[in-house]
Amino acid sequence: DIQMTQSPSFLSASVGDRVTINCKASQNINRYLNWYQQKLGEAPKLLIYNANSLQTGIPSRFSGSGSGTDFTLTISSLQPEDVATYFCLQHNSWPFTFGSGTKLEIK
Amino acid sequence: EVQLVESGGGLVQPGRSMKLSCAASGFTFSSFPMAWVRQAPTKGLEWVATISTSGGSTYYRDSVKGRFTISRDNAKSTLYLQMNSLRSEDTATYYCTRGGAYWGQGVMVTVSS
């Protein structure tokens, strides 16, 4: 199975800060990497698909980059409503696997 | 609007069975692969099973292979997950998802005596 190593596990930042979250795959997954946001008690929401494509309706402050084994989710200017846990997902090969999550809070 | 509504969860004893359903609407159900993803309490996400548009191809994570069966009824726009020989480690919220892009609200399954 492809292992997805996500970092950091926890992140505290101020409103307006630029925030980055990373995922590293244990082998090449091309660009088959999605990013999700999950708020407490809710289902995951797709933010970015195929490494850098913004899902419809998602604010442009969210962006994704990377290919191969190293990927980054960037929030350009953190907003209070961005408090959530963020997960990456590789869908290059079965079984699809998620990162362990990054819990983001406002400082 | 895409809607996915899961049902069928609850409390079940170890070794018993349970069947989850996911009613889909707002899109042509038969045109999309579907999947189940689960999340144990306060834990991360696990992709459990995927089914092709026709139902002819299915994929399972190793920990549920031989115990869980994913199926679909395209005429009813409904996805199913038959779970047999349930274990305590199967306790989780189970989400129905259309290719990882759209998700239901989830249904809780608790396996406990």
Image (cartoon, rainbow, N blue to C red):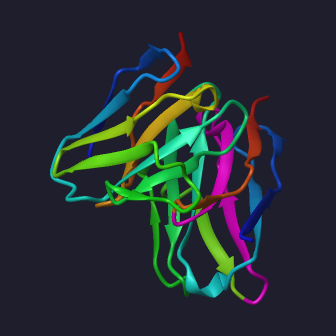
Q: Considering only vertical position in the picture, is A28 above or below B69?
A: above
Which residue is depicted at the point 65% across and 48% down? B85
Q: Considering only vertical position in the picture, is B85 above or below A92?
A: above
B90 falls in the magenta region: yes
Residue A8, can we see it?
Answer: yes
Q: Which image quarter is the C terminus of chain B in?
A: top right
Relative to B22, is B48 on the left or the right? left
Along the viewing direction, whichever of B78 and B26 lies nearer the viewer: B26
Which residue is depicted at the point 83% across and 55% down? B8
Which residue is depicted at the point 45% across and 38% down? A87
Task: Identify the magenta region.
Answer: B75-99
Residue B14 position within the rendered picture, expressed as x and y whole percent measured from the top left: 71, 37
Along the viewing direction, whichever of A69 and B12 lies nearer the viewer: A69
Residue B51 position within the rendered picture, expressed as x and y whole percent measured from the top left: 52, 73
Along the viewing direction, whichever of B53 and A79 lies nearer the viewer: A79
Residue A14 position within the rendered picture, expressed as x and y whole percent measured from the top left: 49, 15
